[in-house]
Image (cartoon, rainbow, N blue to C red):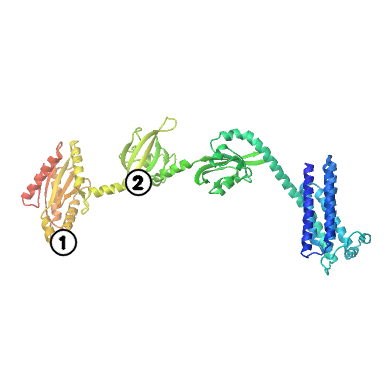
């Protein structure tokens, strides 16, 4: 480990010296710096040669103390060479060069740590200060004003040493400026040493994290491999802070179309394209939670999953376990059920709601899972109509919340086989009722037509057979053809509407009033005999006599002939109609505008 750190330092030093030399050569080539480039190049070459030879010799050292001391001396020589190189390229007139002293201190702090970066900083401060004092008589004079013994620092360069060049002729460096620059240089060096400690700590933690990741990956493979490989639901373990993937289940790779060799270094959000990644990041930050419906992309397909997060702290590191429960099929099934034209609900045998689609929730906004729906589904005539009697389908027409429905119920056993559930669908009959009304009502008068009459009459006779009473009346408008011929068909329509309005005023809701065609009408009186029906028709005669038809300023009274008969138990429909027709014909034979009754 010590030799590896030293090798890193060696490489950084050599790279720094080469970069500095290249920078000097570039500045000299473009005539920005007037230096003795041959002398500079020769100095750099000789020092690099010295450094490489010394490093090779140091490679054979075995004792750690020897390696540490020798490495410090070697890199200290590098600081001294940089000071010498600074002198060669202009010294105090080239202060920008001092930035090169920062990198050795930083690298030493990152690699060697402890007191070593501060030692390198002190060597750099000392060597730069000595060069500056030696080069600047003004600085020595200025410092002597503060009582410092500068005479001892007077120095004449030897003959073999090249004189300091003047890269910027005419430029004067004041001693005050030089002193301030040296002070700032010292501060930067110490700050770089301190900063290198932070970097060193960060690198150390990062290195430790990488080593821990390697160790934990091996441990995770031993601890979780069997469990995760056996888990049919996709799952993944990630670092909570970076979301980098540590381990995945086999089903996760299959679900997201991944290969194991693609995972190293990848984060969760690199391999799973969440449509709302911020929700997942928030859950990872909390360390726990669940997203019931989390959409994401797998290839070209959009999938839905329930994502659960559990926090795992191990070895000083915080992880997150994410489990994916695929709900795509359930989501599409719910979409289909919600798209049904029928309300669908599933109830247990006590009436508790187990499922409701969207139409059901719209019909019963208060409905929720587990709610007892008995009261909401209750109708006066049958409070338990929704209960299925078995696996056979049953149907019933019900009216709920002001609307009519055709309900279909089928039974099914719940898991465990000990209880019974009812699957009920409610199809609105509003449109169907509208069509039925159109098919069974006369469009002009808005009363029932012949079809409805012919359907209702047998049911009335059946009720009479069971002990009820009923009467049937046939009504024909008198001289209706003459109205059409003399006043027009529009007047004929007005006559029909006026007649129907007058009759309906005397009828009850339970009575059936129908137009059989043209000027022919029939009334089925519920729970009424022929005598009571006769009295109702007499009231119609009296009211109609006070309501003349008004057409284009002309007034004309309407009249009608009618026959009425009681419905007999066991009587056929045809026989009943014959008796009523006989009474009607008798009224017409007697002069029209009257009613004849038959028992």
**Residue plotted at (57% across, 45% down):** 271
Image quadrant in which you'd find residue 375: top left
Residue 386 in view, yes or no: no
The quarter of the rendered structure image containing the N terminus is top right
Q: Residue furthest right?
A: 152
How far across and how far down the image is residue 498, in percent?
Answer: 18, 56
Identify the residue position indicated by label 1 in the image. Answer: 550
Left or right of 40 on screen, residue 545: left
Residue 16: assigned label: none
The tag earlier along the polypeptide, 1 or 2, is: 2
Instruction: Tell me where residue 90 appears, x and y as whole percent.
Output: 83, 62
Quadrant the C terminus occupies: top left
**Residue located at (22% from left, 45% from top):** 510
Q: Residues within 10 Å of mark 2 (few under 14, many from 20)?
A: few
Count up the numbered dots.
2
Q: Is residue 120 visible?
A: yes
Identify the secondary structure beneath mark 1.
Answer: strand
> Is 209 positioned to the left or the right of 76 in the image?
left
Instruction: Decide: is 17 above or below 583.
Output: below
Farthest residue, direction bottom: 170
Along the line of sight, which residue is nearer the eye, 15 or 473? Answer: 15
The image quadrant of residue 480 is: bottom left
Packing grade of label 1 (10 A; few <14, some 14-19, many >=20) is few
Residue toward you, 396 or 466: 396
* Residue 140 place in picture, x, y as percent: 90, 63
Q: CA distance from mark 1 to mark 2?
A: 44 Å
Residue 178 left/right relative to 593: right
Where residue 451 sits: x, y (%)? 20, 46
Disc 2 element: loop
For label 2, the residue is 401
């Amino acid at each position: 480990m010590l030799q590896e750190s030293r090798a890193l330092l060696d490489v950084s030093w050599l790279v720094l010296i080469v970069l500095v030399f290249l920078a000097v050569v570039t500045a000299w080539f473009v005539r920005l710096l007037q230096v003795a480039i041959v002398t500079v190049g020769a100095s750099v070459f000789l020092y690099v040669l010295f450094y490489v030879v010394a490093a090779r010799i140091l490679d054979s050292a075995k004792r750690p103390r020897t390696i540490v001391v020798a490495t410090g001396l070697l890199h200290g020589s590098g600081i001294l060479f940089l000071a010498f190189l600074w002198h060669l390229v202009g010294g105090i007139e080239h202060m920008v060069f001092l930035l090169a002293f920062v990198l050795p201190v930083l690298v030493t702090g990152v690699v060697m740590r402890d007191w070593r970066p501060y030692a390198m900083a002190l060597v750099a401060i000392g060597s730069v200060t000595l060069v500056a004092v030696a080069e600047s008589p003004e600085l020595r004079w200025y410092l002597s004003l503060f009582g410092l013994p500068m005479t001892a620092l007077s120095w004449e360069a030897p003959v073999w040493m090249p004189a300091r060049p003047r890269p910027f002729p005419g430029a004067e460096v004041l001693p005050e400026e030089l002193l301030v620059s040296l002070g700032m240089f010292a501060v930067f060096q110490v700050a770089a040493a301190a900063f290198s400690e932070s970097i060193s700590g960060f690198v150390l933690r990062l290195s430790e994290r990488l080593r821990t990741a390697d160790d934990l990956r091996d441990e995770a493979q031993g601890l979780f491999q069997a469990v995760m490989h056996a888990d049919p639901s996709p799952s993944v373990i990630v670092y909570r802070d970076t979301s980098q993937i540590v381990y995945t289940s086999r089903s996760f790779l299959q679900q997201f179309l991944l290969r194991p060799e693609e995972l190293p270094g990848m984060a969760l959000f690199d391999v799973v394209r969440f449509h709302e990644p911020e929700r997942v990041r928030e859950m990872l930050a909390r360390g726990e939670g669940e997203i019931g419906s989390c959409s994401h992309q797998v290839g070209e397909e959009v999938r839905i999953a329930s994502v659960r997060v559990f926090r795992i702290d191990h070895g000083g590191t915080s992880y997150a376990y994410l489990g994916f429960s695929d709900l795509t099929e359930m989501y599409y099934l719910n979409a289909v059920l919600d798209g049904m034209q029928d309300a669908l609900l599933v109830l247990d045998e006590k009436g508790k709601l187990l499922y409701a689609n969207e139409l059901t929730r719209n019909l019963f906004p208060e409905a929720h899972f587990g709610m007892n729906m008995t009261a909401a589904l209750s109708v006066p005539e049958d409070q338990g109509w929704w209960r299925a009697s078995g696996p056979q389908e049953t149907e019933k027409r019900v009216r709920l919340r002001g609307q009519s429905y055709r309900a279909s119920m089928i039974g099914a056993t719940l898991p465990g086989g000990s209880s019974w559930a009812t699957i009920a669908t409610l199809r609105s009959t509003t449109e169907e009722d509208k069509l039925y009304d159109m098919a069974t009502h006369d469009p002009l008068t808005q009363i029932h037509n012949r079809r409805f009459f012919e359907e209702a009459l047998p049911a009335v006779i059946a009720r009479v057979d069971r002990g009820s009473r009923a009467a049937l009346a046939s009504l024909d408008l008198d001289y209706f053809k003459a109205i059409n011929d003399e006043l027009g068909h529009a007047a004929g329509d007005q006559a029909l509407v006026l007649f129907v309005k007058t009759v309906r005023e005397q009828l009850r809701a339970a009575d059936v009033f129908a137009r059989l065609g043209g000027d022919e009408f029939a009334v089925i009186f519920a729970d009424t005999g022929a005598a009571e029906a006769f009295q109702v028709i007499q009231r119609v005669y009296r009211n109609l006599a006070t309501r003349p038809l008004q057409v284009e300023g002309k007034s004309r009274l309407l009249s009608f002939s009618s026959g009425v008969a009681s419905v007999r138990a066991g009587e056929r429909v045809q026989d009943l109609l014959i008796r009523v027709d006989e009474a009607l014909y008798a009224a017409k034979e007697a002069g029209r505008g009257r009613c004849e009754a038959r028992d």
